[in-house]
Amino acid sequence: MRRRRSWSNGGSGLRRANGRDAAASDKAEPAPVVHSAGDFREHEMFDMQAPWWEFAVRAAIVYLVLLVMVRITGKRTVGQFTPFDLIVVMLLSEGVSGALHGGDESVPAGLIVAATLVLLDVVIALITSRSQKADAAVQGNPVLIGRDGVIYDDVLKRQRVPRSDVEKALRGADCDLEDMRMAILEADGNINIMKKPS
């Protein structure tokens, strides 16, 4: 009987020890933390993948290069969009979007790019308003494309302006070709018609 009691007590002692070990192991190992998809989206929303100044430099480079490209294309591209020009502009915006943010879709990166573009636009506007040379370099000067009923076709070719645009401007001004005193291609791409005095 004593042996049976000793075995039973030993078994209960083992069961108690095993219970204590299991409780201790439960306390030692914390439960894994499960992150939701919203936590990851919030992390990506505000976490920039590059230094802030890189986005400012990217925006400045793209802005200045596009400014030069638009200036080279001539006044017609700036003033009047054909369907082809509109397609080019839309594809151009998609093409440079990656260069602006470098694949970073965070909110701070987008705000830095937007602020840089607006700041550059304000700075250039201030410079061109105070300097005629800078204004001519950025926006260009008006060009005489016709006088006294004669359209200068060679000037139109240099400015890449079709003769049909001048004829359309004449109709818009209700002016016949022989009544035209001057036709001026403005810096913004519009064609201004001046009539002869009656």
Image (spheres, rainbow, N blue to C red):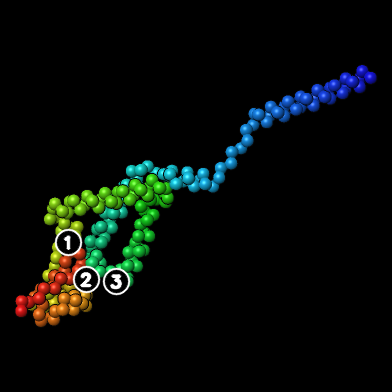
The residue nearer to you, when weighing 176 against 187, is 176
> Residue 180, located in which quarter of the rendered image?
bottom left
Residue topped by disc 3: 82
The residue nearer to you, when weighing 61 against 27, is 27
- Pointer 1 with pointer 3, Cβ within 8 A: no
Q: Nearer the viewer, mark 2 or mark 1?
A: 1
* Tag 3: amino acid: Thr
Tell me the residue at 29%/51% (across/down): 117
66 lies above or below 173? above
N-terminal-most mark, 3 or 2: 3
N-terminal-most mark, 1 or 3: 3
- Pointer 2 with pointer 1, Cβ within 8 A: no
| Residue 141 position within the rendered picture, expressed as x and y whole percent measured from the top left | 14, 63
Kind of element beneath mark 2: loop
Q: Nearer the viewer, mark 3 or mark 2?
A: 3
Q: Residue lying at the far top in this picture: please name it.
A: 2
Residue topped by disc 2: 160
> Residue 143, located in which quarter of the rendered image?
bottom left
N-terminal-most mark, 2 or 1: 1
Mark 1 and mark 3: Cα distance apart in space? 21 Å
Mark 2 and mark 1: Cα distance apart in space? 14 Å
| Residue 57 position within the rendered picture, expressed as x and y whole percent measured from the top left | 31, 47
Name the quadrant of the N terminus. top right
